[in-house]
Image: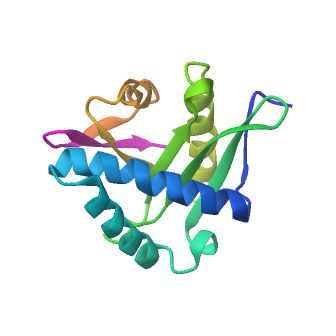
Amino acid sequence: MEKVVLRKMKNYEYNNWMELSIKRQAEDRAYVNNTLALDEELGLYDIVKHLLPGGKETFNHHFYSIDYLDDKNCGFVWFGVIPGLPDDQIFIMDIFVDNFFRKKGIGKQALILSHKMMKDLGYKFSVLNVLKENKAKKLYESLGYNVIEDEIKSVVMLKEL
């Protein structure tokens, strides 16, 4: 088995992941917007309901579990189309690697696999948003992402696939 494999997320994984993803994103949004995480969390539930009317089966949204050696699940990745994004771009909504598995190159391998999938789906560019202080920003830069929008606490980055 390869070191890192992306596999379609199972239903129970999706439900667990959605809870974690919303909580993590709410904390980031609260930091950026100087608001309460609980308020951001409530707003995100509404946004996700609108963005994903079919849940994990929503058209043009892709949910994968990241498995590492011997099928150990260590994270997840979600990429999809969002309103207002050009047709040749796809957005990495969330990528997460458990703390225990970090600094092993898993996130980098998962992104490389994701980029190949995105390209195979016909997209020419990958877009993401990251906090400026997030250590993952350096990873994104090493993979060819460039800042296209520079905000006070975060940046939007784009990579040609």
Predominant SS along the magenta part: strand
Q: Position of residue 40 (x, y in %)?
A: 28, 60
Q: In this view, does 45 lie above or below 25?
A: below
- Camera sees residue 91: no
For the residue pair 116 and 6, the one nearer the viewer reads as 6
Position of 82 with respect to 118 (left or right) is left
Position of 30 with respect to 16 (left or right) is left
Q: Where is residue 157 in the image (x, y as percent from the top left)?
A: 32, 42
User: How many marks do you count on the picture?
Assistant: 0
| Residue 69 falls inside the magenta stretch | no
Q: In which quarter of the image is the N terminus?
A: top right
Q: Position of residue 71 (x, y in %)?
A: 82, 37
Q: Is residue 159 above or below residue 4?
A: below
Q: Position of residue 113 (x, y in %)?
A: 64, 40
Quadrant in the picture for residue 60:
bottom right
Colour scheme of the picture = rainbow
Kindly identify the residue that appears in the image at 43 percent across and 73 percent down.
51
Position of 160 with respect to 133 (left or right) is right
Residue farthest toward the top in the current orientation of the protein: 103
Kindly identify the residue that appears in the image at 54 percent across and 59 percent down.
18
- Camera sees residue 137: yes
* Magenta stretch in the rendered image: 149-161
Q: In this view, does 14 lie above or below 53?
A: above
Kindly identify the residue that appears in the image at 41 percent across and 48 percent down.
24
Kindly identify the residue that appears in the image at 80 percent across and 30 percent down.
2
For the residue pair 92 and 28, the one nearer the viewer reads as 28
| Residue 153 falls inside the magenta stretch | yes
